[in-house]
Amino acid sequence: MLARIKRLAPYFLLGPISGPLVAGIVHNFRGGRPVLGTMYAVLLIECVYLLPALAAKYVPAALG
């Protein structure tokens, strides 16, 4: 039980969205599925960069 918590803790510290995406990247590259791991990486980049950028652009226009 403790070993499982130690293994999963870094992913939970990253957050509820970023954590599972990073876990998907790591597990897919380790499992020999680089294309799927790359797709997870692209989605992580979109969530980290594009989502806040789009929200900053469109939310003030919607509120104002």
Image (cartoon, helix red, strand yellow):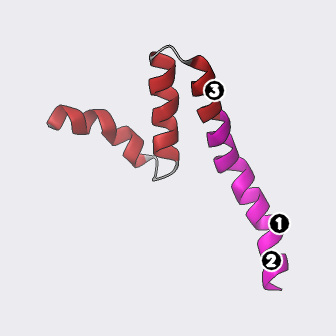
Callout 2, which amino acid?
Pro
Q: Quadrant of the C terminus?
A: bottom right
Question: How would you rate the neighbour count of disc 3 (Cα within 10 Å): few for under 14, some for 14-19, many for 20 or more?
Answer: some
Give the left or right position of residue 1, taking residue 59 as reference.
left
State the image quarter where residue 9 is shown. Answer: top left
Q: Which disc, if any, is residue 57?
A: 1
- CA distance for labels 3 and 1: 27 Å
Q: How crowded is the residue under tag 1: few (<14 C-alpha within 10 Å), some, or many (20+)?
A: few
Percent x, y of residue 44: 62, 41
Chief secondary structure of the magenta span? Answer: helix
Check if mark 1's residue and mark 2's residue have beta carbons within 8 Å.
yes
Q: Which residues are magenta?
A: 42-64
Separation of disc 1 and disc 2 at Cα? Answer: 7 Å
Q: Which residue is mark 3?
A: 38
Q: Hey, which residue is sitting farthest bottom in the picture?
A: 64
The answer to if 51 sits in the magenta stretch is yes
**Looking at numbered disc 1 in the image, what kind of residue is underneath it?**
Lys
Indicate the position of residue 11 as horizontal and vertical percent values: 40, 41
Mark nearer the viewer, 3 or 1: 3
Give the mark nearer the N terminus: 3 vs 1.
3
